[in-house]
Image (spheres, helix red, strand yellow):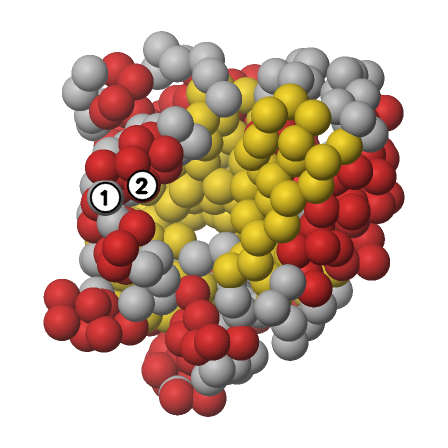
Amino acid sequence: MTAHASDDWLVVDTGLRPADENMALDKALLLAMLESRTPNIFRFLRFEESALVGYHQSPEQELNLEFCREQGIAVQRRLTGGGALIFDPTQIGWELVCRRDALPQGDMASLARKICEAAAAGLSLLGVRAQFRPRNDIEVEGRKISGTGGIMDGDVLLFQGTVLVDLDIPRMLRVLRVPLEKLDAHAVSSVAERVTSLKALLGKAPELMAVQKALLDGFRAQLGLSFVEGDVPDTITALLPEALAGVRDAEWLGINRRARDAMPLRKATLRAPGGTLQAEMLWDSYGNRVRQVRFSGDYFIQPRRAIVDLEAALRNVHLNDVDGIIAGLFEKQAVDGFGLQPEHFATVLRMAAKDA
């Protein structure tokens, strides 16, 4: 391994691997960092075609497991929370595994923002206008190009993100649990309005090494990090066999397993002073949580991106928390709903939650 100063971050590129190896490496990295057996690490990773559910998710609810089996798409669980991700070799994963004091102080929300802003600055060097979108996404012109998430274990942080270098939307929709009757041109165009890739923005996919260099440059400029490239330390590879056995155990994928139909799609319409507000919500009755929501209807709202930000803020949240989240966003962005108030959005969500 290359020698490095104590304040240097070790950059490792673990290359194209099966999903279980990538997840096992995350576990090994965390354990080695907890035992102070490795420097702070910035890791690049790529996946053979796979579908990853968040730690708190059920594969049966999130994925079309039959399609995954037919197509040889590996299914794995991440250590971090958040939603299901579809990976193929065209996409790049990046992650920081470090002691908490290696990064700016503050709560996790402010730290996530700083990390995302650094990644966005790096992606912007490729010729796109990337920026942070609360709670934990990076977008270009209102469309998501990177999702992120993290966990703390003691004083050790694992924070990871993706870069959509290219994206096959129809195949992504087949992997996710989308009803067959909804897999039409409208569904594809709807996703394309919310998600994008570097290839779609630039006309061609940039080289993977160029994307990696841009990201590192962004972290240098925004967070003042210094990097040295090297191999995965032996202390980590020694932990890999046991970690790999753990993620290959059926119990790992079975965490939080729930019946396929325990998360129905709920809809509701509210006629309010500011117009007609509709909510289409993926509802987790097991956890009493809003998993995902889309607002539509006949209304005006400024700024226009307020709805996109609101939908992002309302992912995977408990129903009891929606009032505070919505009110906070209205206040922070000085939202003008032309008669629509925060309580109208909260009300339509509760109506949808009760919808049979």
Foreground of the two, 130 or 190 = 190
Q: In this view of the protein, which residue sits in the foreground, 13 or 17?
A: 17
Q: What residue type is labelled 2?
A: Ala
Name which residue lies at 25% across and 58% down: 180
Q: Position of residue 165 (x, y in %)?
A: 28, 33
Q: Is residue 206 above or below residue 98?
A: above
Asked if residue 173 can be seen in this view, the reply is no
Q: Residue at x 57, y 58 (%)?
A: 266
**213 relative position to 96: left or right:** left
Residue drawn 29% across the image and 73% down it: 65
Does 282 sit above or below residue 212?
Answer: below
Q: Categorize mark 2 by other alpha carbons within 10 Å: few (<14), some (14-19), many (20+).
A: some
Mark on residue 87? Answer: none
From the viewer's perspective, is 296 left or right of 53?
Answer: right
Quarter of the figure with residue 170 = top left
What residue is rendered at 65% in x and 35% in y?
277
Residue 150 point in image, percent of width and height: 60, 52
Q: Name the residue under label 2.
A: 187
CB within 8 Å, label 2 to label 1: yes
Percent coordinates x, y for residue 286 in the rendering: 64, 76
User: Whole-Å distance between the Cαs marked 2 and 1?
Assistant: 5 Å
Secondary structure state at the residue bearing disc 1: loop
Classify residue 106 by image quadrant.
top right
Q: Mark 1 points at which residue?
A: 184
